[in-house]
Image (spheres, grey):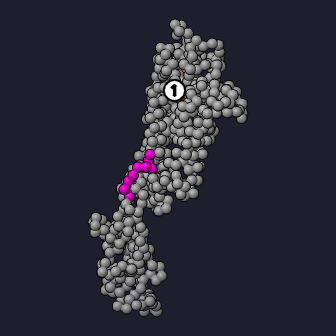
Amino acid sequence: MTSLKPPELKPNDFIHGESSFSAPGIARDDVEAVNRAKPREFYAPRPAIYPKQAHGTFRRIKWIVMAVTLGIYYALPWIRWNRGPDLPDQAVLIDLEHNRYFFFFLEIWPQEFYYITGLLIVSALGLFLFTAVAGRVWCGYTCPQTVWTDLMIAVERFWQGDRNERIRLDKQPWGAVKIFKKGMTHLSWLLIGLATGGAFVFFFRDAPTLAAELVTGTAPESAYFFMGIFALTTYVLGGLAREQVCIYMCPWPRIQGAMTDRHTLLISYRPERGEPRGPHKKNDSWDGRGDCIDCQACIAVCPTGIDIRDGSQLECIQCALCIDACNDIMTKVGRPANLITYDTVAKQEAKAAGLHEPFRPVRPRTILYTGALVVVSAIMLVAWFNRTLLEINVLHDRNPPYVQLSDGSVRNGYTVKLLNKRPEPRTLLLETEGLPGAMVGIIGVDPSEHGHVHVPTDELREVRVLVSVPPAEAAKLGASSTPFWLVLHDSENGTHTKRAAKFQIPQPRHDNGHEKEDNHERH
Ligand code: SF4
Ligand code: SF4
């Protein structure tokens, strides 16, 4: 069997001479990958990168993802949702004033913050799973840094033209045209930054009201502060720093290596098909050479300025634009597409050895991530569907724990806190269960209300509850502390919620052979 392993070639072996075929709009001599596989200098200055516009399937997918993600971010605070008379009718609202988070029909209270934690865990596990299967899809398509950088580059292209025009503009001396083009680019970036910061603060207050306040200068200072911070970071990170954030600032490229393996799909150049590379003249034979014509279109479109033909690299955000660029070239020169493609290391190694290796999305790593994802999601769902919309907190009086009344009955006092999480007020009947003969009195509630407590919507109400047990029934309670239930009935919707409590009675005391009772306050 003949090995298809490519000969040991150095990339610079192929950067030479006149090209008979260049990618449209690319002069070969001004395209140079920023990280050629050669000894590199430490602390090298940042190379200028002028990403060329790509056209193709993955570019279209990225436009769609950009439109959807930015659309969601900018439009979400403006979606209305009926939240009753006391709250803004906003579908997604982080209500810091009342410590609550609203997401359409979901309402999360501070004591339910574990739902947010659970959501973050589910998101992280989902990200692990996607990364294990298809590499840095998050980086390439949905990361805010990628999306906003893509937007900033599109704006730059709008004002300054595509790659070659931008290169020429940068080489030009400063003049009116250059000042105008550069000025409009930076102004547009700043406006995008302002819109981004504005959208961010709208999540925290009623968006239409806050927008009016921002315009009239009457918004809270914190709104201007955070809007300014977000505007500046969007401008700097998306407009100026761009690929530097991915290469030097973001920890994810370093972490994701722990989730990938030989079976993970990565954007890969197929050397067994592309090598030996070199310029190709029209009508020349393709025999004895590879399909790569060394046109460098893949480098020209790359937003991080790398050469994917050097192999998998930390700088590669897996945006797939080099696939589009190369497919474009392959179509033009009449060779099969996907010289650069999503591929796995295992498949590439097998191909180089003349073998076949299938794509293996199901493997121990992905099974583990999927299992963890299912378990955490199931726990979250069970917790969510069992969440109560009435929180009850019962605190037994500590001193005195009980009071014996003059008629012999025993009384215990409790502080009961009721939190109504429904969007409407509730009237609740408070009763006991499991404590025969018990009578309930609520301090501050008119006896004519017959044990009913009114709890306004979204409010915490605290009441003092006195539970009395007649002497005959108290005598039957064997233990000094008897468990029972405090039950709240909602007559309007027929639901009932209960909370465990304990009823304490005087403990018989033995003293010199005589049985005595505790001497407590008598009423
Ligand atoms: S090498 Fe290709 S996939 Fe990687 S960042 Fe550059 S264009 Fe995107
Ligand atoms: S891999 Fe494709 S796009 Fe890149 S230089 Fe070779 S032919 Fe051109």
User: How many labels sit on residues?
Assistant: 1
Figure quadrant, ligand 1: top right
Residue that badge 1 annotates: 54
Q: Quadrant of residue 370?
A: top left
Q: Is residue 245 left or right of residue 497?
A: right
Q: Residue at x 37, y 70 (%)?
A: 455
Viewport quadrant of the C terminus: bottom left
**Where residue 312 sits: x, y (%)?**
57, 29
**Could you say where residue 168 lies in the image, as x and y percent from the top left?**
63, 25
Q: Residue at x 35, y 64 (%)?
A: 424
The picture places residue 465, in percent across and down from the top left corner, at: 39, 78
The quarter of the picture where residue 457 lies is: bottom left
Q: Classify mark 1: helix, strand or loop.
A: loop
Judge left or right: residue 32 versus residue 358: right
Residue 146 can be seen in this image: no
- Asked if residue 32 can be seen in this view, the reply is yes
Q: Which is more toward the observer, 155 or 455?
A: 155
Residue at 44 percent across and 81 percent down: it is: 401
Q: Is residue 180 magenta?
A: no
Where is residue 413? Give x, y as percent: 41, 80
Compared with 213, 325 (above or below) is: above
Counting other residues with Cα less than 10 Å from the Cα at mark 1, is it few (<14), some (14-19), or many (20 or more)? many
**Which region shows up in magenta?**
75-83
Front residue of 122/212: it is: 212
Residue 30 falls left or right of residue 62: right
Give the residue type at disc 1.
Answer: Ala
Disc 1 under 8 Å from ligand 1? The reply is: yes
Residue at image position (47%, 41%) is: 70
